[in-house]
Image (spheres, rainbow, N blue to C red):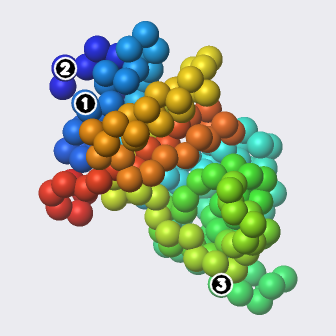
Amino acid sequence: MNLKNLHIKDGVHLTSSISRTIECMDKFFEDEKSEITSGLRTEQDQLKIIIQKLIRHGKDHEFVEFIEGVENHWPIDKTVHLNEINRDLFWWARSFSRLLNLGDIVNPPIPCEVMFDYIRPGSQANKKGEIIQISNHQRGKSFDIGGGKNLIEKSKRVVKAIESGECFIKGWLHEAINNAVHIDCDQIGGPTG
């Protein structure tokens, strides 16, 4: 890729869909050097992000099943029975749900029910009890541009790229709490195209 304004952070995995969109968007970031901070993610990558966010909020020790799961390296799909609510849940489900409850947007590593009140920015509907699907990052159709010191300007550049109709952007989200602009792009190729 021949990019002048957008830099790919080391370790970020790209798909052909993401690469195409980044290449098309590059010209819209002239004089606003920016970094692609995330691309294709695995289930494990998604769980690591959840853990990092919980630590940042001081919520990584709120639920005993989460502590045990992290310490014992439980598989993502392992469930535990919680007597207090008489339900079987993924060991990380309540901790993931707590992040949403705090307003920190994140998708689960595998589809999961929201256990606490959660109202997504721009919506009025409470998603408690709904199943949240995996991130488009795991499908190879999303990437993030880090906000650096100027997240609002980066969002404006994304809007201009969308308005141009040239960049294969399906949607975007200004994520202030993550200091990033999340971008969904059109898929080309296979399931992680």
Residue closest to the eye, 92 or 158: 158
The number of numbered badges drawn on the structure is 3
Task: Give the quarter of the image for residue 86.
Answer: bottom right
Q: CA distance from mark 2 to mark 1?
A: 8 Å
Which residue bears the numbered disc 2?
2
Q: Which marked residue is nearer to the observer: mark 2 or mark 3?
A: 2
Verify CB contact (< 8 Å) between mark 2 and mark 1.
Answer: yes
In the rendered image, the residue lying farthest to the left is 189
Structural crowding at the residue carrying mark 2, measured as other residues with C-alpha within 10 Å and reported as few (<14), some (14–19) or many (≥20)? few
Please tell me how crowded label 3 is: few (under 14), some (14-19), or many (20+) other residues with Cα within 10 Å.
few
Q: Residue 109: x and y, percent?
A: 49, 62
Q: Residue at (31%, 42%) from the top-left corner?
A: 165
Q: Where is residue 150 drawn, in percent x and y?
A: 60, 20
Between residues 47 and 65, which one lies in front from this camera angle?
47
Judging by the rendered image, the residue that carries numbered circle 1 is 23
Left or right of 72 in this view: 190: left
Q: Secondary structure at mark 2?
A: loop
Note whether residue 136 is visible: yes
Residue nearer the viewer, 126 or 90? 126
- The percent position of residue 184, horizontal first and vertical second, equals 40, 50
Q: Quadrant of the N terminus?
A: top left
- Which comes sooner in the sequence, label 1 or label 3? 1
The answer to whether residue 30 is above or below residue 115 is above
Identify the residue at image location x=25%, y=30%.
23
Residue 88 disc label: 3
The kind of residue on which mark 3 rests is Asp
Q: What's the amino acid at mark 1?
A: Glu
Q: Earlier in the sequence, mark 2 or mark 1?
A: 2
